[in-house]
Amino acid sequence: MRALYTIIISVYGLFLKLSSLFNQKARDWFYGRKNLFSKLEEVFKAHYTEDNPKPVIWIHCASLGEYEQGRPIIENIKKKFPEFSVLLTFFSPSGFNNKSASSEADYVFYLPIDTRKNAKRFVRLASPAIAIFIKYEFWFNYLNELHKHNVPVYTVSAIFRPEQHFFKWYGGWFRKHLRQMKQIFVQDEESAELLSMIDINNVKVSGDTRFDRVTEIMFYATEIPLIESFLKDKKVLVAGSTWPADEDLLKELFKAMQGSLTMIIAPHEVNAGHIKEVKQKFNGNCILYSELENSTLANEQMPDVLIIDSIGLLSRIYKYADMAYIGGGFGVGIHNTLEAAVYGIPVLFGPNYIRFKEARELIKQEGAISIKTADELITVVNSFLTNPEKLYNYSEASGNYVIERRGATRIIMDELESHISEVISRQY
């Protein structure tokens, strides 16, 4: 089975190499790994030839979203155990490109593709004392190599579903690797029950560290003077991580609500071409964030739509919202709802949300609403504008949903601290 798995992984790597000829993300993925082992060898040869080299804790995230889940763990490790070095790896460019200069980690690299040869070489070079994988990341050659070297492996904020290969008739080989892990921290009881049904009991229900992360972001969110200068005495809808299908609906909402609603739109893609397309949808009745500083318009002359043409602001912009619209629900799936919900505001999104547990639960608790058409969006927003009690109830439900689910980081760190202390005692 391992040989077949490795062949499939190798073919996948070849596919991405070919895709790099015409796809920018695949190009970043492929060329980001160029000479990767030379770089790893240089860094870790220097690391382990130091006097009393620090033991390494390896934390792996697929992408930027998983990094946000893992970040509370990284920060706690760095704070409580400065005698360790943190190696952070990413599978995708969206994580690596945004966090390659991460101050939370000592070393940041792409993860070499999961072949037997790569796994052996990587584990030998990095020689981690502990490995932590975030959420969905299960690379079975790496897991096997870590097990052979007696490296304890943890999975954090994992969530399991019946359709995963672990629960199929052919899943025995995959299940073996789960049993070899030191601890699997899952988000919910349903995941723990699924694992128990296949005799995997090294499991603890901890919740999702993203609730701790978004709470931290909210707590430390600083003011954005240019946003404050734009705001008017109207209700504010912040639309985050939008795609063209979302922006088409927002265009219709703007036409229906013109004069009674201020909109701030932060597109998922902020390249010049897409920003131009968004501007055209609003017939120029909008202003870019980059234009605010040099604008000579008085507040009463400002248009009602602000388009954010830079990255890194969205999680702080939600603090100015009375309601939020989360993009992606008319494509492969919605983006981060918790970044908005933590501020205690209703959350709206398109129909493709079923894979996202927090979206389903927010709807159940009446802190969020899914819409399918522009008319539905207009109706829902209008109901919030004309019914303050409804707006208040949805806002309270949304905020309470986040508050009630904080604390996963503490549960996980209690377990990790015990093992890290064992490693320290062996070192000294």
Image (cartoon, rainbow, N blue to C red):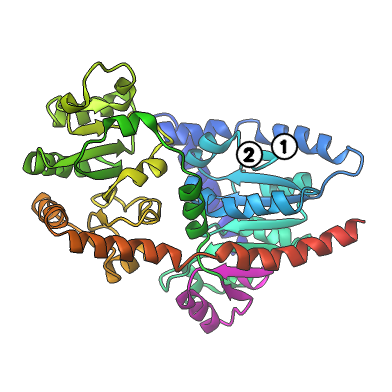
**Left or right: 227, with 207 as reference point:** left
Looking at the image, is 272 positioned above or below residue 420? above
The amino acid type, in three-letter code, at marker 2 is: Phe
Looking at the image, is 402 positioned above or below residue 34? below
> What crowding class fits label 2: few (fewer than 14 Cα within 10 Å), some (14-19), or many (20 or more)?
some
Residue with the mark numbered 1: 40
Horizontal and vertical percent position of residue 402 = 42, 62
Horizontal and vertical percent position of residue 139 = 59, 56
Q: Nearer the viewer, residue 122 or 98?
A: 98
Secondary structure beneath disc 2? strand
- Residue 313, image quadrant: top left
Instruction: Give the magenta range.
Output: 177-205
Horizontal and vertical percent position of residue 243 = 26, 41
The amino acid type, in three-letter code, at marker 1 is: Leu
- Please give the name of the residue rendered at 65% of the width and 31% of the height, measured from the top-left corner: 35
Q: Earlier in the sequence, mark 2 or mark 1?
A: 1
Q: Are marks 2 and 1 in contact (CB under 8 Å)?
A: yes
Q: Which mark is residue 109?
A: 2
Looking at the image, is 92 positioned above or below residue 165? above
- Please give the name of the residue rendered at 69% of the width and 39% of the height, measured from the top-left corner: 107
Check the picture and name the quadrant holding the C terminus.
Answer: bottom right
Q: Is residue 186 magenta?
A: yes
Secondary structure beneath disc 1? helix
> What crowding class fits label 1: few (fewer than 14 Cα within 10 Å), some (14-19), or many (20 or more)?
some
Residue 170 seen in the figure: no
- Please give the name of the residue rendered at 64% of the width and 38% of the height, measured from the top-left corner: 103
- Please give the name of the residue rendered at 20% of the width and 33% of the height, measured from the top-left corner: 305
What is the spatial separation of the Cα atoms under label 2 and label 1, in whole angstroms?
8 Å
